[in-house]
Amino acid sequence: MKLPIYQIDAFAEEAFTGNPAAIVPLDGWLEDQTMQSIAEENNLSETAFIVATDNGYHIRWFTPSCEVDLCGHATLAAAYVAIQFLQETRNPICFDSKSGKLFVSHKIDVNKKTILTLDFPVAEYEEIETPQALILGLGKAPIKTYAAADYLAIFSSEEDILQLTPNFSQLQELDRRGVIVSAPGKEADFVSRFFAPNAGIAEDPVTGSAHCLLTPYWANRLDRTELTAIQRSARGGALTCALQGNRVLISGHATLYLQGGIYI
């Protein structure tokens, strides 16, 4: 069996930046273990599988070690593949997922490039006492900590974020998907990094789903609904975010890196 595969750099205007995701369009679902094996073989933070439906696509996301309930950058990449290679003309594109219906709209920007916008649910969060494993894992105590599907650790400055050298074995003791660290930015409203060793991802280059939590937090703190963001990983990535009621709009570009076939 031969399956098409596309590797897309999401939240990137050029190759080798942003967050790479593999997208595999299917006529019907494969066995779960087969999809997990493909994701493990790809060894990217996420591989997304999509199956066309009457209203759009059903999407599932796999890290090298497990299936996850939500992934932003791979959804953005899947929309890019649908538009560029699957002759998709609907706008927005609807993706059915374990996290409900997700929408991706698209338009041409002033530089004649396609900009894609995720429409995701807001993440509800609460302030908590900082777990000791989080402090040990990050090597520095945040000024505040919040909990949702991920932990959100807030620091005072961008320098704090850049200087973190996590102890991933300590972070693996935590009971959430991952840890977002964030602070005010110099070139953007806020910066972040994302660590998820429990999901097989030491540090994710650019994490769309993390901004479902980051956007409402910073919108409330800065008293603004439109924000700019930079994820300060080694590859880096830029996003624009908007809070609209109980939804978050997360926008960025995508770039094709690889097109090929999987033989199984």
Image (cartoon, rainbow, N blue to C red):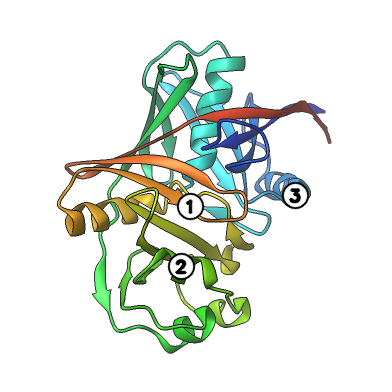
The amino acid on which the numbered mark 3 sits, given as a three-letter code, is Ser
Quarter of the N terminus within the rendering: top right
The reply to whether residue 230 is in sight is: yes
- Which residue is painted at 67% across and 37% down in the image? 30
Side (left or right) of 106 relative to 75: left
Residue 139 at x, y percent in the picture: 52, 83
Residue 187 at x, y percent in the picture: 40, 48
Q: Quadrant of residue 153?
A: bottom left
Q: CA distance from mark 1 to mark 2?
A: 13 Å
Q: Which residue is mark 1?
A: 231
Q: Which residue is mark 2?
A: 159
The amino acid on which the numbered mark 1 sits, given as a three-letter code, is Gln
Q: Which residue is mark 3?
A: 37
Q: Secondary structure at mark 1?
A: strand
- Which residue is painted at 24% across and 69% down in the image? 126
Which one is nearer the viewer's eye here, 198 or 117?
117
Q: Is residue 139 above or below residue 80?
A: below
Label 2: how many Cα within 10 Å (few below 14, some 14–19, many 20+): few
Which sits earlier in the primary sequence, circle 2 or circle 3? 3
Q: Are marks 2 and 3 in contact (CB under 8 Å)?
A: no
Residue 105 at x, y percent in the picture: 37, 24
Q: CA distance from mark 2 to mark 3?
A: 38 Å
